[in-house]
Image: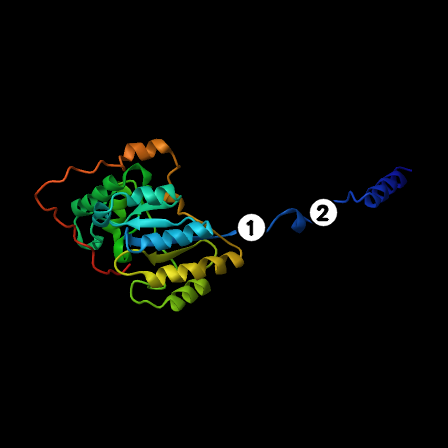
Amino acid sequence: MRKGIWIGVLAAAMSLGLTAAPASAAKPAPRKIVYLTFDDGPNSGNDPRLLRILRREQVQATFFIVGQSLAADPDAVKRLYLAGHAIGNHTWAHEDLTHLSTTGMASTLRATQRLIGPVGGACMRPPYGAVNTSVVAEVNQLGMRMVMWDVDPQDWAHQDSVYIANHVISHVRNRSVVLLHDGGGPRVATATAVRTIIPALKARGYEFRTVPACRVPFRMDLLGAAKIDQPKPEPTPTPQLAVPTPSPTSP
């Protein structure tokens, strides 16, 4: 009798469409993630076009900034932060950290971090990817996270936008970190490639994010604390010394 009751209940549920959906239908497919990163900036000759492309595509990226370039354009931090991008440390003068003493490593990273201010994350990228045990130890001592990469079209070495785009699109995997450059020289090919890379990867189901270690929550008080909007000094008769522009560099 009891068995007959349960058979009747099951039949009624099936007729009303109350049977459980398959597990595959209940869980959406996980999103694939990719991190676009740009080294060696800021560069006022390259960044405006690149930022327009990122804004139009509603994509946030991570920028690893060289201190001496930021000194020449201190408002760059504000532009990047307000656009939703993450900011990391790429040393003061793109030094090979493996050639520096412990004191030298601390000096170049701290000087850059002070200039970036509180809108920069506690993250860094070693120029040239040059790392040894001393570098790792010092970065850890400073409380910073080292961010490397796994996709590198070597856009610093050429101006072939088709190659850059094809290399990135074909090599990206879930959670890939893509190394590109907005500084160190003209980067028209990089910006052009990014315009192709983003829609191509979106079509393949990728979601663009900023590197978590470099992300700082957006807060207006951080902008105030960083003192980004410095008043312009009164003009003086003495000429201002030009800040040297970094020469083209490898990643």
Instruction: Tell me the element at label 2.
Output: loop
Q: Nearer the viewer, residue 174 or 44?
A: 44
Where residue 189 sits: x, y (%)? 35, 63
- Identify the residue at image location x=38%, y=66%: 161
In the picture, measured across the screen, residue 159 lies left or right of residue 209, that is: left
Residue reaching furthest left? 238
In the picture, measured across the screen, residue 201 lies left or right of residue 246, that is: right
Which residue position is annotated with label 1? 30
In the picture, measured across the screen, residue 124 lies left or right of residue 170, that is: left
In the picture, measured across the screen, residue 145 lies left or right of residue 195, that is: left
Residue reaching furthest right? 1
Q: Residues within 10 Å of mark 1 (few under 14, many from 20)?
A: few
Amino acid identity at mark 2: Ala
Q: Nearer the viewer, residue 214 or 49?
A: 49
Kindly indicate the quadrant of the structure image that contains residue 17: top right
Which residue position is annotated with label 2? 21
The residues bearing labels 2 and 1 have C-alpha atoms spaced at a distance of 18 Å
- Identify the residue at image location x=66%, y=46%: 26
Number of numbered callouts drawn: 2
Where residue 202 sits: x, y (%)? 51, 56
In the figure, 177 relative to 115: above or below? Answer: below
